[in-house]
Structures are given as structure tokens and as C-alpha cells.
Amino acid sequence: MKYNYVAVNSKNRKYRGMMNAESRSEVIRLLQARGMTALSIDEFIEGITDENANKRFWEKELNEKDIHKVKISRKKQLTMMHQLAIMMRAGITLSMAMDLLLESEKDKYFRKILTEINTELYNGIPLSQSMASFEAFPELLVNVIQAGEANGRLDLAFEQCSRILEKEISLLSKIKSAMAYPIFLLVLTIGLIVLMSIVVLPKFEDLFTGFGSELPAITKFTMAVSDFIIHKWFVVLIIVAAVIIIYKLLMKFNENFAMAVNKIILKVAFIGAVLRKSYIARFCRMMSTLSDAGVSILRSLELARDVISNLYMKDCLNQIIEDVKIGTSINSSMARYPVFDALLVSMIKVGEESGALSESMAKMADMYEEQTEEETKRLTDAMTPAMTIIIGVIVGTVVISIVVPMFGMYRVISESA
């Protein structure tokens, strides 16, 4: 029979869960063996699986989320894996390590996730199987932990998961920080255009119109732009919204369009190089870690493919996976796709022939991570002066469009005098 229970441990921490047992007394005995005291034990009723369903309506939490669909940040995942690795290395059992994690966890939803995992561990369900039911944990981490369970080295699996997450967080952080200043300049440029069009130019337009002098072409152009932004701003918003919606619909429902866009992105100057090398770095890092964890080559390729968001590169890897299934080596299949460097193909070939694929992939991951950082810095260095020039051209155009008519006004005033 199944029983729902509420119990507290020696530190008065409350736990809820479900347990298979012959009777209530056996549930009490099993809880006591875990160092917990039962507060309530109820027979499980089929059809009511959510503990919130047994509450009165005024006791239910508003907007209660399904914890199996809750997402958690990479940093929180890293903290969990790092702590588990340390505790397992220290000889602490997995169940006790989970109890300690629960003691320190403050996030409401993550606590519920850990509580359910802990309950399932006590009921004999493997950690990887329990984690797989939550969207909070990527399939990649689940597979590494599953491999650790199979070879009896969960401590090593947790360390490998920590390294994966550390590299992911570090790489994404570097890219974001490098792009922050160019994005700031872009926003500044747009703000400057809007400010001059709405505040500055209209005042001079009234002044110029009052003198009745013929305005130069550049002034007419800037005034027309200003007038359009002031009176037809909604047209701009409609056009931008329509373009975005059409683009997203095409990307979602037109596979050829999406594939073409993703392929073009990889060829865009600077940006394409950064993205391509960051994708390859992630692919190599995942392949290295998964191979070390004991995951099969085919499964490693599938999981490493899934960390790449570019559809074109993912399609290339799909073809490589199909080739590997029929016995083709990774390097010979990969050599058919120009998106993968010759050096990468050569290193994979060396790794496959020497039986040291994991080491080769790790070295390539280090190299491509360094190159990604260099390319990102180069992109930032190129964008900064480019945006500065654009801002200068905009300001210069507005200033010229204002100054040139003033000479005409001065001439009119002089002739009148």
C-alpha cells in the first residue's frame, strides 16, 4: 500500500512524501530509521497526486506552479552539483547529502523539487531517473549522473556536471559582458535620434518657417524625418512588429527559411565567427565530459548536438550521427561539412585512432573557448568605433541641417535692413 506522510527531522524541518509500506506502523518505523518523526500518515488515494489537492481551497497557494516544469538557473544547478560533489567526496551518503541541501535551500520551488527527489531516493528510485522528471535539470546532466550511477562514481559525475556548468556560465558571461557596451551605444543612438526629432528639430522648424526662406535639401529631409516620427510613430511600430512577427512565424513553420537564416548568420562578419567558435567549443566540451563519464559515443554526439542552437550546425551533426550509426568515423563524416575546421577534424581523427578522443576534445574545447573570447573582443573593438561614427554622422547631419538655413536667415535679415 501507499501512504502520504508528513514528518519532521531532529532539527524540526518538515518533510512531505509518499512511501510504499504494509501498514502505518511500518511507515513510522521506516521514518524513524531515517531519523524522522511522523506527524501524520494517510493512505494514498488514487487520483490525488498533488499534495495541494488535499488542502481546503483557502489553504491552497495562489498561482501554484507545477514543480516538474519549473526552470532553475545554471548558477543554482552549479551550486547543487558542486555541493553534492564535495559531500560525496567526504564520504557522506547521497540521501544525507540531499538532506543537507534541503536544510540550506531558500528557494521555495527548488526546495519542493529537492524534497520530491529525496522522497524518491528513499523509495529506491535512482537519482538520474528522479531528476529526469523535472525540466529544471538538462538532459545532459541527467545522462552524466546516470553514467556515474552505472560505474559507481557519482562523486566524479557531480564534478563533471560542475565543470560543464562552470564552462557554460563562464563562456556566456564573457559574451554578454563583451556585447554590453555596443548594445549600450546602439540604444544611445536610437534615443538620440528620437530626442532630436521630437525636441530639437520642431523648434527650429517653426523658426525657419516664420522667415519664409527656401530651406536646403538636407534641412527638408531632417524636418521630414522629425515630422514622420512625431505624427506617424505608430506606423514605425506597426512595421517593426509586423516584420518581427513574420520573421518568427517563418522561423517556426518554414524549415528552409530557418535553415537558410541560420546558415547566413554563421557567415556574417565577426558575429558569425564568434557564434561558430562558441558552438564548437560547447560541442567539444560536452563530448569530452560525456566520454569521460562513460556515456557511449553515439549518445554523447546526440547530447552534444542538443547544446547547439544553430539549426544548420545541428543539421550537420544529425547527418554525422547517422553516418556514425552505420560505422563511419566521426572525423571522415565531419570533414564533409565546411562549418567544422580542418584542425578540429584532424584532432578528432587523432583522438579516434589513438583511443584518446576525450583528451583531444578537451584540448579543442580549450582552444575554441580562447578563440571565442578573442573574437568577441575583436567584435567589441570593431563595433565601438563604428557606433561612435554613426552617432557622429547623426549629430553632424542635424547640426548642419540647422546651421545652413541660419545663414539664409542672416542673408534675409541683412537684405531687409
Image (spheres, grey):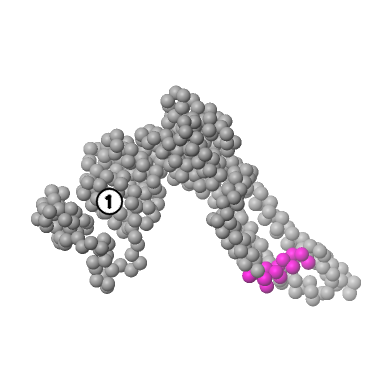
* Residue 117 in the image: above or below residue 216: above
Left or right, 392 with reference to 265: right
Q: Range of the magenta residues? A: 220-234
Residue visible at 26% across and 41% down? 87
Residue at the far top in the pictured view: 354
Residue 40 position (above or below residue 350): below
Residue closest to the eye, 41 or 279: 41
Q: Residue at x 62, y 67 (%)?
A: 238
Is residue 356 covered in magenta? no
Image quarter (top left, top right, bottom left or bottom right) of the C terminus = bottom right
Residue that label 1 marks: 117
Q: Residue at x 53, y 34 (%)?
A: 334
Can residue 223 be found in the magenta stretch? yes
Residue 210 position, x and y percent, is 79, 76
Q: Quadrant of the N terminus?
A: bottom left
Residue 328 drawn at (x, y percent) = 49, 31
Q: Quadrant of residue 25?
A: bottom left
Please state if 244 lies on the left or on the right of 152 as rendered. Answer: right
What is the three-letter code of the residue carrying label 1? Ile
